[in-house]
Structure formats: C-alpha cells, structure tokens
Image (spheres, grey):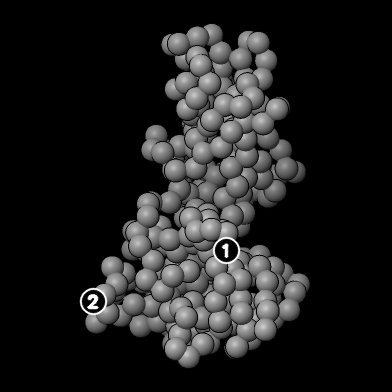
Amino acid sequence: MKKQPQPRRSSPAIIEFLENRQFLSAAPAISDAATFSTSTALYVSNRSATLGQTISVKGVVTSSGGIDKGATVELLDNGEDTGLTGVTNHLGYYVFTLDPGQAVYVGTQLWRIRVLTDGNFVGSKSRQLIGKTLPPTLATESDGLQLATVTSGTGAVATAGEMATVQYTGFVASSGSEFDDSDAHSPGTFTFALDADPEAVIPGFDQEVTGMKIGDTRVAVIPEALAYPTSDTGSSLAGDTLVFIVHLVSLSS
C-alpha cells in the first residue's frame, strides 16, 4: 500500500450466497450474431458473507457445439466494466476471485459475464444475477479506529518491527469507491515495516495490522486523524474516512 494511493475505480459489491458450495446458473442469453448462449454461475461457501470474505464468480461460455475455450470474458457490475477479465479454460469457464486484494464493497450488485473475443461469441452476455454483502460488526478503539476480524488465521502474531506482507483493498467510506488495491500492483501483495519510524503507512493501517495473525483478514474504518488529515493538502484523500480490508499473508524479521 502506497502512503498516498491514487484513485482507481468504483468497486463492485459482493454476490448473493448459497449453501453447500452450490452453483447458481443463469438462463442463457442469445446473441443476435449467432446461435449460442452464455451462462454464469456463482460459487460460494456460505449463505451470507461479510465484507472482506473471498468470493468466487464463475463465468461459463457454451454454444450449441459445446464449450468455448480460450474466450476472453469480463465481469460486469450493473452493466459497467469492472476491469476484471480472464480467458476461459479447456472446460469453457473462468473464475473471478474477489479476495482481500481485489475486494468488493457493501451493497447490492447485478453481475454479468460478457465475452470480448472469439469470433461470433463477441458481445454475448449472460443474464444478470443479484448479489449482496453485509458490513461486519465493528469494535471501536479509544482513538476512534473501528476494527473487525472477518476471517481468522492460525499463524504468528504481527508485532512492531516486523516486515508484514499483506493483501489489501481501500475504499472511501462516504462513497464506497475504491481508491487502491494490492492486486493492481506487482506481485499482488504489499510489504512494509510495522510501526516504523518514519512511518511506512498511515497510522490507522499500522494499527489495523498490528496484532493480526497470519491468515487473518480484518476490516478497519480509519478516521481522518489516523489517515490523511484535512491539513494534508498533498493527498487526494485528505479529510476522508477510509475503509481498509487487509489479509496478513506472512511475517519476517
């Protein structure tokens, strides 16, 4: 996480969840270009989800002749491009993984898969599927930071002076818009020194990660005073309350 990340795009919201790791398939949508169909399926592990939990969205491309492998597909959010694309495998599907490094925000979304390439399949879309996610129950610290652990790990505990490697996504609380995520930066993780002097990250991010176990995922609502104060005229996020989803990948000394 850069100390002053730049705005990127609005985030999608989490999909509706099913029990027993089932698929929910949309009815086929027929393109004007050819006789074929696309379908989407949602793969989840619980009935309802909390902000920050990893969700998989499976897009399937089929036709009257069978599966369509090697097609480029994109994930749409209420008709808008999310920026997430992939290529269908030999079984004709691609799985979009929405994890703490590419998280989605609280709200309701209409998900669609659209084909970008592969002959007559271009432009075909699946039908829309409604999805939702709920906010976590937050505990408030004495300095105003709000925290919730949404996935528990079992590894070592992060302490001051260690190098922490994390996945993260940051949102502006007032709008729900995403301003940065670790998946947008190679290698998809961010490593920094905890409680460094001078600080490597904003105070609220340091505080969020300190005390996490490897494997934990936390959600933090970080007030202006622990993020970018209004007086910080060099940041586009000055004065904003921020929401960070953070997953602790590893620790080193």
Instruction: Please tell me which residue is depicted at 54% across the width and 8% down the height of the picture.
Output: 35
Helix, strand or loop for disc 2: loop
Could you give the CA–CA distance between mark 2 and mark 1, rounded to whole angstroms?
28 Å
The percent position of residue 185, horizontal first and vertical second, equals 50, 58
Foreground: 19 or 227?
Answer: 227
Q: Which residue is mark 1?
A: 189
Instruction: Please tell me which residue is depicted at 38% across the width and 78% down the height of the picture.
Output: 227
Q: In which quadrant of the rendered view does residue 167 lie?
A: bottom right
| Position of the C terminus by quadrant | bottom right
43 vs 53: above or below: above
Report crowding for label 1: few under 14, some 14 to 19, many 20 or more residues within 10 A (C-alpha).
some
Foreground: 190 or 245?
Answer: 190
The disc labelled 2 sits on which kind of residue?
Thr
Q: Decide if residue 32 is on the left or right side of residue 45.
A: left
Instruction: Please tell me which residue is depicted at 50% across the width and 25% down the height of the picture.
Output: 117
Foreground: 147 or 186?
Answer: 186
Residue 136 visible to an observer of this rendering = no
The percent position of residue 80, horizontal first and vertical second, equals 38, 38
The percent position of residue 134, horizontal first and vertical second, equals 52, 56
Q: Which residue occupies the extreme bottom position in the image?
A: 197
The disc labelled 1 sits on which kind of residue?
Thr
The percent position of residue 11, horizontal first and vertical second, equals 43, 51
Q: Which residue occupies the extreme front position in the image?
A: 186
Q: What mark, if any, has residue 233 been given in the picture?
A: 2
Q: Decide if residue 88 is on the left or right side of residue 127.
A: right
CB under 8 Å between discs 2 and 1: no
Q: Decide if residue 222 is on the left or right side of residue 245.
A: left
Helix, strand or loop for disc 1: loop
Instruction: Please tell me which residue is depicted at 53% across the width and 21% down the height of the picture.
Output: 118
